[in-house]
Image (cartoon, rainbow, N blue to C red):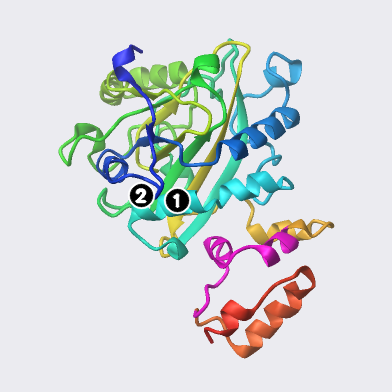
């Protein structure tokens, strides 16, 4: 990929995303942003993750082939820094601005910090050199709505430097309503419709050349348009479930750390929670999530699906029940009581 197609992050301002960044996401589907999140929090979490995951080049790292942290860094986590970043005010405010809704109208559906390793062996399930794809099949039960009525925001927070590890995210910006890459319905990818799931680029494109040459030609045009996110630690790539993108190869022997998150509109209930429900975490014997939830802000609770103050759920009886459940951990019922 030549330098002309490499995209560097543009800085946020003290209010959050700039009008130009918001417009870029709404029109093109992708924007890479820097200086939105505290550098100290990014560095602290990077150090934690490096201690948790296998070192690059190790035998354990060579066995890693697919997505995810294996539960080490999935919200809610034992690591306070991870939980703090997942629901950071700057992040929530930015996502709400992109969707043009109030922050309280957001719901978290994914948060996972995971490693990706550079290696040379590949198979059809490998994510080392991904095929171009959209994420909607594994996030929602239906097809994405109209481009101009987005229901969710996906994002990647990078903890590594692309100059050290490569592994940039490749993406296809949308160019207006007539863009041939973005004509409904979206079905020209492995894992969509009749096409089997194939993660590896070479295997996927071989399949289409053999089984659906017209789809192979369409996809070849996508690769020709590919831009790459030249990320630095703390950069955030905001994109969508209906944007063509892929993970590009890493430098052999290196590791890339990144966190994938997704937020949906509260009324977009066709978009699934990617992890086990947050309440499942309350089976932990140390009751970490109960303690966190009791001390969380009203906004943080609401983004997880906790009824907001003023919601019809709240009555004297339900508030008494919730208070009985969380009062031992410091829960303050006042914001909910005042709205009854």
In magenta segment, residue 306: yes
Q: Is residue 304 left or right of residue 182?
A: right
**Total labels drawn:** 2
Extreme residue in the bottom direction: 316
In the picture, residue 292 is in which quadrant? bottom right
Extreme residue in the right direction: 285
- Residue that label 2 marks: 143
In magenta segment, residue 254: no
**Residue visible at 24% across and 32% down?**
181
**Residue visible at 47% across and 33% down?**
235
Q: Is residue 267 left or right of residue 146?
A: right
Distance from Cα at disc 1 to Cα at disc 2: 7 Å
Q: Quadrant of the N terminus?
A: top left
- Residue that label 1 marks: 140
Is residue 30 shown above or below 338?
Answer: above
Q: Quadrant of the C terminus?
A: bottom right
Badge 1 density bin: few <14, some 14–19, many ≥20, Cα 10 Å? some
Badge 2 density bin: few <14, some 14–19, many ≥20, Cα 10 Å? some
Q: What span is colored magenta in the figure?
A: 289-310
């Amino acid at each position: 990929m030549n330098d002309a197609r490499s995209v560097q992050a543009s800085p946020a301002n003290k209010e959050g995303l700039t009008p130009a960044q918001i417009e870029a996401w709404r029109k093109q589907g992708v924007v890479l942003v820097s200086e939105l999140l505290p550098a100290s929090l990014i560095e602290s979490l990077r150090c934690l993750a490096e201690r948790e995951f296998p070192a690059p080049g190790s035998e354990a790292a060579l066995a890693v082939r697919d997505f995810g942290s294996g539960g080490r860094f999935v919200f809610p986590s034992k690591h306070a820094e991870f939980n703090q970043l997942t629901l950071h005010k700057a992040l929530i405010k930015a996502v709400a601005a992109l969707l043009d809704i109030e922050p309280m109208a957001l719901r978290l559906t994914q948060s996972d910090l995971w490693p990706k390793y550079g290696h040379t062996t590949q198979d059809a399930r490998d994510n080392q050199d991904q095929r171009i794809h959209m994420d909607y099949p594994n996030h929602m039960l239906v097809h994405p709505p109209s481009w101009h009525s987005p229901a969710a925001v996906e994002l990647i927070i990078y903890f590594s430097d692309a100059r050290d590890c490569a592994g940039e995210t490749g993406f296809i910006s949308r160019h207006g309503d007539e863009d041939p890459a973005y004509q409904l319905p979206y079905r020209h990818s492995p894992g969509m419709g009749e096409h089997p799931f194939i993660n590896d680029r070479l295997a996927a494109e071989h399949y289409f050349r053999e089984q659906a040459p017209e789809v192979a030609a369409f996809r070849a045009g996508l690769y020709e348009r590919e831009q790459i996110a030249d990320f630095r630690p703390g950069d955030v790539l905001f994109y969508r479930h209906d944007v063509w993108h892929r993970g590009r190869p890493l430098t052999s022997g290196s590791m890339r750390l990144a966190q994938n998150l997704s937020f949906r509109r509260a009324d977009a209930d066709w978009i699934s929670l990617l992890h086990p429900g947050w309440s499942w975490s309350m089976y932990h014997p140390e009751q970490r999530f109960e303690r966190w939830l009791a001390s969380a802000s009203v906004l943080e609770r609401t983004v997880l699906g906790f009824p907001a103050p003023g919601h019809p759920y709240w009555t004297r009886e339900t508030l008494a029940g919730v208070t009985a459940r969380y009062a031992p951990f410091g829960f303050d019922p006042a914001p909910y009581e005042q709205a009854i």
